[in-house]
Image (tube, helix red, strand yellow):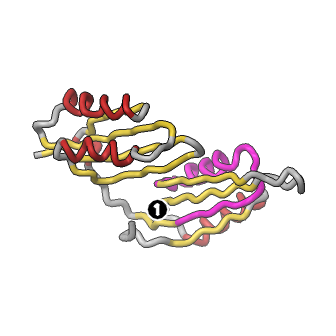
Amino acid sequence: MTHRWIVTALGKDRPGIVAGVTKVLYQLGCNLEDSAMTRLEGEFAIMLIFSAPVRVSAERLQKAFASIERQLKLVIHLKALSAQETRTTVQRAQSYLLSVYGADRPGIVYRVSEALAKAEINITNVETHRSRGSASRRSPSLYLMMIEVEVPRRIPAAWLEQQLRKLKRTLGVEISFSSTETDVL
């Protein structure tokens, strides 16, 4: 029998963060199940779900992570997942990848995510990047956003495409979307 947990770790980017966090899990006999780890400018962020043997208590986990937290100057948070939180539901949805590209301006992420939420489209992953414009050519910064979404099967792709065209005109950005395989990582 196991218990499932989520751990987040955040700190200044440096070699050894992934090794340090996953070493703690390995030494305690835990199994890493799902994760997202990335560098954002000079910071590194980890979110991962793992299962731990029943004998591994919350106190033991916190004590084990305290050492790596001090050593690598990380902020680490642990949360036990309830049985209800660990149940995955099979949704009748189609997965899509949206890409948004254009001149950087406030509100792009908000406006796109708001439109998706109003259509009851679930966002499963978001990545954004802003490129610095050239001061010598006075070119603006460009903004790129990649969004993975789950669209309920009751929503036709043509309707979604029409809504994205409206949003594209409103924001003055390029928006494209393509279907993705749900079985692929």
Question: Is 100 included in the stretch rendered in magenta?
Answer: yes
Amino acid on which disc 1 is placed: Pro
Task: Describe residue 95's horizontal placement relative to residue 21 as left or right.
Answer: right
- Asked where in the image residue 174 lies, by quadrant, the reply is bottom right
Of 129 and 183, nearer the camera is 129
Read off the residue under disc 1.
152
State whether residue 175 appears in this view: yes
Q: Position of residue 150 (x, y in %)?
A: 47, 60
State whether residue 170 appears in this view: no
Give the structural element (helix, strand or loop) at label 1.
strand
Of 18 and 91, nearer the camera is 18
Taking the spot 52% from the left edge, 65% from the top edge, the residue there is 155
Q: Position of residue 26 (x, y in %)?
A: 22, 47
Give the extent of the magenta segment: 97-124
Of 83 and 36, nearer the camera is 36
Task: Describe residue 77's horizontal placement relative to residue 5 as left or right.
Answer: right
Taking the spot 75% from the left edge, 51% from the top edge, the residue there is 132
Q: How many marks?
A: 1
Taking the spot 58% from the left edge, 50% from the top edge, the residue there is 118
Task: Describe residue 185's horizontal placement relative to residue 61 as left or right.
Answer: right
Of 100 and 13, nearer the camera is 13
Label 1 crowding class (10 Å Cα cut-off): few <14, some 14-19, many 20+? some
Taking the spot 82% from the left edge, 54% from the top edge, the residue there is 134
Q: Position of residue 173 (x, y in %)?
A: 75, 60
Q: Give the answer, above or below, for where 37 lies relative to 71.
A: below
Q: Position of residue 2 (x, y in %)?
A: 15, 45
Question: Is 95 included in the stretch rendered in magenta?
Answer: no
Task: Describe residue 30's horizontal placement relative to residue 129 as left or right.
Answer: left
Q: Quadrant of the C terminus?
A: bottom left
